[in-house]
Image (cartoon, coloured by chain):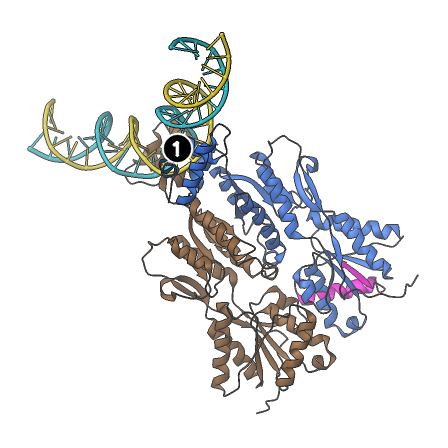
Chain colours: A blue, B brown, C cyan, D yellow
DNA sequence: AACACTTTTGCAAGCGATTGCATAAATTTG
DNA sequence: CAAATTTATGCAATCGCTTGCAAAAGTGTT
């Protein structure tokens, strides 16, 4: 493994000159620079990561924080797509990414504490945003920079984040069902403490209000089939004329679809469904699921760009909104308005 | 951020003593050790990652290599589950993980070159195994340790790996269909250059041969609906009496299922399907998909354990086989044997 | 040709840990 | 009680790189 001394020696200069030459310092003469660059290339030199970070006291790795480890979350490809976006930007900039995970909130926080104490994480990207997140509290306590993907729960103006306009997305999805003639539309969600769900709910409510339609909400995780069936039974008893569902994400939409299709009575009713995320699930479902695409890879890329920019702590925060788009498939049916 | 000097000062000893005390060196007296440990705890001290690695010339991060970036791969939660397993073991050992990705083979190899040159990766875990992988060539060239998840293509005895017994899994899946009365069973795959697919094929062939049944293979990716339909048309023209499919993974099984369900003739035939991976897809499908569970998280954990063990280069390699298990759902139907 | 600038280069001191070796303290022994 | 051991500590070098500052080389001006 070549060191800077080897490069310097081969170029016939001192290590300091070599270092400056390779960093494009203006005070190095052109011929010297060329000699150094050539030598470096010949030796296949890359600065030692640890030494460089130690010397500059500026770390170069981004900590990517996954939500607390719940089987369901890890089976959602959404996160991997965001990671892919982050990683592609980071490797363009010569940065590394490292993951923080934990099977409980405590463990996750502890892992992050260690990462901070070891002092080699430049800043963090949180792949989620939720109410009263202890991770955020920790990062603020240590005054570590972070970017969240999603809408921050608190300190919105002081936090850098990348998000979709989930309120608008909720509205768009709902309006789409309305345009197709639906009037009794239910919003299905699973966890109100996630910021993203709250926003999509708001968007739904706005769309319904604009048309003077009633809000019909259902909180249900469909964790097992029996619970799902009984919840739906109760639901339809109360709201017999619902024809469409806006589900807060594709996975939930599919779970709903599954329960509906398993019951002959419900199946024939051909409910309309729209989900969010345009995940692979929506393509593989039968019928294929209409879904609001949110471009997780893009979210990751933008978050990484902000993280790379490395602003001083007190500068203004950045917010970037990634557009969404409805991808029409076969789970939404046009109906005669009951108007 | 506390340094070892701060700890030493607070404990009233020299930095070297502090260092030794915290590393459990035998030559430090008990009272001194306690003073140091106490001081360290009070200062919330953790050794600087970069400094420590530099001094010991032994890095502590594991590079996790994802397959070349193809949308489909990143939408498969399988990988995230493996990463989760790796990360949980690594953080227990105080190691970091960092990801290597690339949108092309060249880019991936380049990223790995940089990581190696920077000299801060202890060793690598490859989340896939395929024929003539340039990444493997690179790692071998630089004499960097690595563990592969999957069966190595070459140097099986010299490579550490974690895998399922995919041959047996292929046999088991096929036998299960046979037990349910199927006789004309097709094996559906998408990319023969992946070791995992090759092994499952072998397993299928073994099971069919044992029963004197003919091999019926279909290579098809179902990248778009029209291609899928025409491929199947051709297929059924040749093999009209096929009743069951063993698909090399759940995603492919679902794509097949989708095409089958979209055609009224095919739909009524109620083909039986079995997939592999027991991914979330299999639960969300309708009907739910019978699938061979392979426990990706476990694969990741075992790979991480091997990677952590950090054996000298020329020691014997380790191979670990993680058991699989058929998870029965509703996509396999019993039929009267045509025997 | 001597002086005053500029431009380039190199010396040496860090960054925060670890570790071989010398020394100091404690203990045993004669 | 002094000498010989054993045990515990600290000094200083090192890992590979960066960077402030001083020295050297180059340029231009009288």
Q: Nearer the viewer, residue A260 or A315?
A: A315
Start-end of magenta stretch: A219-246
Determine which residue is flagged by label 1.
Answer: A15
| Residue shown at the point (68%, 49%) measured from the top left | A194
Q: Position of residue B135 (x, y in %)?
A: 46, 57
Q: How many marks?
A: 1
Left or right: where B55 falls relative to A96: left
Q: Nearer the viewer, residue B276 or A304?
A: A304
Q: Position of residue A27 (x, y in %)?
A: 48, 27
Graded by Cα atoms within 10 Å as few (under 14), some (14 to 19) or many (20 or more), the crowding at tag 1 reads: some
Q: Is residue B280 above or below residue B141?
A: below
Left or right: where B10 falls relative to A71: left
Q: Which quarter of the figure is the N terminus of chain A placed in?
A: top left
Q: Find out whether residue A225 is within the magenta segment.
A: yes
Q: Quadrant of residue A224?
A: bottom right
The chain letter under disc 1 is: A
| Residue B151 in view, yes or no | yes
| Residue shown at the point (60%, 91%) measured from the top left | B338
Q: Nearer the viewer, residue A4 or A99?
A: A4
Q: Which quarter of the figure is the C terminus of chain A placed in?
A: bottom right
Q: Position of residue B54 (x, y in %)?
A: 39, 39
Q: Is residue B79 above or below residue A51?
A: below
Q: Secondary structure at mark 1?
A: helix
Work out which residue is located at the far bottom of the displayed protein and give it.
B339
Q: Position of residue A288 (x, y in %)?
A: 72, 66
Q: Nearer the viewer, residue A94 or A338?
A: A94
Q: Quadrant of residue A268?
A: bottom right
| Residue B41 in view, yes or no | no
Q: Is residue A284 above or below residue C6?
A: below
Left or right: where A177 falls relative to A282: right
| Residue shown at the point (49%, 41%) measured from the top left | A114
Q: Is residue B142 above or below residue A152?
A: below
């Amino acid at each position: 493994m070549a060191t800077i001394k080897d490069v310097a020696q081969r170029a016939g200069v001192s290590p300091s000159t070599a270092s400056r030459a390779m960093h494009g310092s203006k005070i190095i003469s052109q011929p010297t620079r060329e000699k150094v660059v050539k030598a470096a290339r010949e030796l296949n030199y890359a600065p030692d990561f640890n030494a460089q970070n130690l010397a500059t006291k500026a770390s170069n790795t981004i900590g990517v924080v996954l939500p607390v480890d719940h089987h369901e979350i890890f089976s959602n490809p959404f996160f991997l797509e965001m990671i892919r976006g982050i990683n592609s930007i980071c490797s363009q900039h010569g940065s590394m990414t490292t993951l923080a995970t934990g099977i409980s909130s405590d463990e996750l926080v502890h892992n992050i504490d260690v990462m901070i104490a070891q002092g080699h994480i430049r800043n963090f990207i949180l792949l989620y945003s939720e109410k009263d997140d202890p991770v955020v509290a920790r990062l603020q306590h240590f005054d570590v920079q972070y970017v969240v993907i999603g809408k921050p729960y608190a300190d919105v103006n002081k936090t850098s984040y990348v998000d979709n306009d989930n309120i608008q997305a909720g509205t768009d999805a709902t309006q789409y069902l309305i345009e197709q003639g639906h009037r009794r539309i239910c919003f299905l969600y699973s966890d109100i403490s996630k910021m993203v769900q709250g926003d999509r709910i708001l968007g739904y409510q706005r769309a319904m209000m604009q048309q003077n339609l009633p809000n019909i909400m259902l909180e249900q995780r469909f964790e097992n089939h029996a619970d799902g069936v009984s919840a739906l039974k109760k639901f339809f008893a109360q709201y017999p004329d619902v024809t469409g569902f806006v589900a807060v994400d594709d996975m939930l939409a599919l779970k709903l679809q599954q329960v509906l299709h398993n019951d002959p009575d419900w199946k024939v009713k051909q409910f309309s469904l729209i989900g969010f995320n345009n995940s692979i699930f929506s393509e593989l479902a039968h019928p294929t699921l209409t879904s609001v695409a949110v471009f997780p890879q893009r979210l990751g890329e933008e978050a990484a760009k902000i993280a790379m920019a490395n602003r001083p702590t007190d500068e203004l925060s950045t917010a970037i909104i990634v557009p969404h788009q409805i991808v029409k498939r076969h789970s939404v049916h046009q109906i005669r308005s009951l108007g």
